[in-house]
Amino acid sequence: MGGLSPEGRGHLAMLCFSALVAGSFSLGSMVANEIAPAALNAVRFGIAAVVIGVAAAATTGIPRAALRAPWRYLLLGGLFAAYFVLMFEGLKTAPPVSAAAVFTLTPVLSAVAGWLLLRQVTTPRMALALAVGAGGALWVIFRADWAALWAFRIGQGEIVYFWGCVAHAIYTPLVRRLNRGEPAVVFTLGMLVAGCLLLTLYGWGDLRATDWATLPPIVWIGLLYVSICASAMTFVLLQFATLRLPSAKVMAYTYLTPTWVIGWEIALGNGAPGGLVLVGIAMTVVALVMLLETPARRR
């Protein structure tokens, strides 16, 4: 990454982010009905905080200045905690494909939040790229099946998860608004600790009621993955990219998530998509190329 510009590093970080996040949909749907979302995510934030805390101590350290205005971490931690709890609540009833379709709304929501909070302007070219990416992502997640697309119905799970995506979209520009020069790993640690505290308070009843010793192995596998890969690593990647890219560009990478999900499906033995799905994959790539070439007016 040494030869890349700051914006280039941000794009590379989001490429990795989208691949890691995709695993949450596959594994999340497998564990959503095995454990209460608040209990799962409280432990998840705790494990991720330990991992990031060790990383921060070994690299940048934790400067005293990072402890200023702790309300920032509570706000950000609350937003991301809400996103994950609502995601797992939604996955109790929403099929992963439908949830992924809802997730593709996040870039547009983030562009709106970016304008409201930071006055970041989404140019016509960027808006076109977002539209192309959204169309491609939908084509991919519905596996090029027009009948499946037109038969899509909004269920309770999808509605619940939509509000989680709203929280996610607000979180992205707020990171840039509230960061006061803290390194990404330190800022992430503050958010994780705050999120863990809030989730522990909110889900204390679920934490005590969960019989941890009898949970099936898939829950522990999913918990470790979402804690380390889809939490600790992605939080740092997201914060790193948000400080270098406009919010709309950051969240545009969610359009790649359905493509990565298909990769997860293949890896889990659920089969490869048909040839027409490659059209959607190509559309998401075109959208990303357009975003790479889009000059941001306000950063």
Image: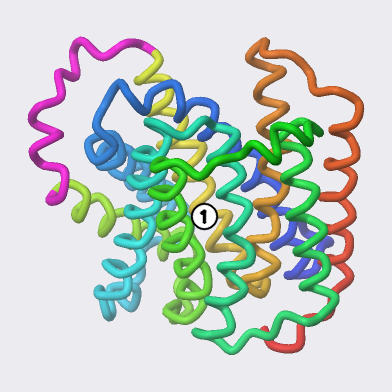
List x then y, in percent, for residue 21. 57, 41
Q: Quadrant of residue 51?
A: top left
Task: Indicate yes or no whether the magenta region holds residue 25.
Answer: no
Q: Secondary structure at mark 1?
A: helix
Residue found 24% across the figure and 41% down from its top: 38
List x then y, in percent, for residue 238. 56, 58
List x then y, in percent, for residue 9. 73, 61
210 is higher (above) or lower (below) than 293: above
Q: Is residue 142 left or right of residue 193?
A: right
* Magenta-drawn segment: 201-217
220 is higher (above) or lower (below) than 95: above
Tag 1: residue type? Val
List x then y, in percent, for residue 206. 14, 34
In this view, the residue in front, 144 or 58, is 144
Q: Quadrant of residue 71?
A: bottom left
Residue found 38% across the figure and 49% down from its top: 160
Residue found 74% across the figure and 14% down from its top: 271
Q: Which residue is mark 1?
A: 236
Q: Main secondary structure of the magenta part?
A: helix
42 is higher (above) or lower (below) than 61: above
